[in-house]
Image: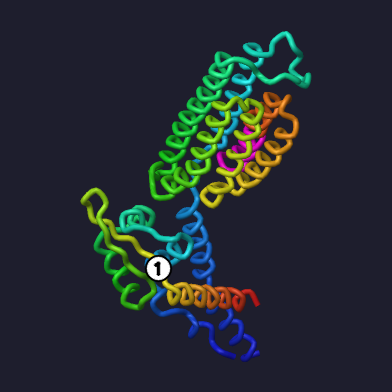
Amino acid sequence: MKNPFDSLDKILEHRLRLQIVSVLVANDSYDFNALKELLDTTDGNLATHLRALEREKYLSVNKSFIDRKPNTRYKITERGRTAFKKHLEAMEELIKQQKR
Amino acid sequence: MQKRSLTLNYKVLCMSQNEPYQKDLESIRQLMERSVKFLSLSGLSGILAGLYALVGAAVAYFMVHFPMSPVEYRQESLQGNQVILKLLGIAVLVLVVSLITGYVLANQKAKKKGVKVWNTTSRRLVVNLAIPLVTGALFILILLWNGHYGVAAPACLVFYGLALLNASAHLFDEIRYLGYSEIVLGLICALLPGYGLIFWAVGFGVLHILYGTLMYKKYDR
């Protein structure tokens, strides 16, 4: 049988990245400041992991200005949604094995 | 014997390795819910809004229909702009006081939880509520302007129900059923316009107290 540990998504094994993706899966879009407040993290930390997820094409970025202030919105991509689903399934499989 | 202890060891090893995943899954589920739902809404504000509506309905009854029994079916529609303005005033007052109560209590609950009451979720909630509500309010005002007084109460209930459904993604699950109840009540009310005030009192008073109590028991304690 395939080892479920291998099915875990290497990018999403990081806690904050998994949290970011789960918020974006649950919402149409989310902006930088709202994410920062919700996940209770720092600008730098959040930006680093958002960039990593963007590089993997797990999310798309839309920059605009609201009242002359920059506003960055993030959206999940199909690729990101699929990766999240597979990662969750692998986690569930691991939990099932533990109960067996 | 050797083999058995080995598998046991393996199992324990797996357990300690896998346990965090269970916690992770649970925390993700909570995070997703928190990112979508406005959890600061207080059940108590529903109960109070219901009480205000009942007081408002009682005032309206004594002001407009009084010598007539409140459960008697009214054959005649309301007459006169004076009366309509008074009823409208009562309804708006009930709405404003309820909104203020809701905001104050949500603010308290948010503070207790250490979160901000005004965030992305609550902004989306307000927009999703406001679109059907403002549409309904304008629609009702236009109907009143044209003298169709009988549809005001059912239209209030139906549009309010639709607004709740529209915003239900951001609210506790119970609110969806409150929305369905308001719509059904509004449609029945449209068939029996002479009982408008009673239906209004049930929809905005009794149902709010009922669902508010339910939510208060489930989420506020």
Q: Residue furthest right?
A: B72
What x and y, as percent, mark residue A64? 27, 59
Which stretch did the figure color magenta?
B208-221
Residue B166 in the image: state x and y as whole percent. 55, 48
**Is B210 part of what is drawn in magenta?**
yes
Residue receiving disc 1: A15
Above/below status of B78 relative to A42: above
Closest to the observer: B154 or B44?
B154
Q: Nearer the viewer, residue B82 or B8?
A: B82
Q: Quadrant of the C terminus of chain B?
A: top right
Is A90 colored magenta in this rendering? no
| Residue under the point 48% across and 31% down | B99
Give me the residue at 62% from left, 33% from top: B208
Pick out the residue farthest to the front: B146
Image position of A92 with respect to A67: above or below = below
Q: Residue B209 in the image: x percent, y percent? A: 64, 31
Which secondary structure is most common in the magenta stretch?
helix
Visible residue check, residue B128 = yes
Nearest the camera: B75 or B40?
B75
Name the kind of residue labelled 1 in the image: Arg
Quadrant of image for the N terminus of chain B: bottom right
Vertical comparison of B124 with A74: above or below: above
- The local secondary structure at tag 1 comes to helix
Parent chain of label 1: A
Give the side of residue A12 with respect to residue B159, left or right. Answer: left
Q: How is the rendered protein coloured?
A: rainbow
Residue B209 visible, this angle: no
Nearest the camera: B79 or B73? Answer: B79
Left or right: where does residue B92 sit relative to residue B7?
A: left
Residue at horizontal 33 percent and vertical 56 percent from the top: A36
| Residue A58 screen position, x and y as percent | 39, 74
Quadrant in the picture for residue B73? top right
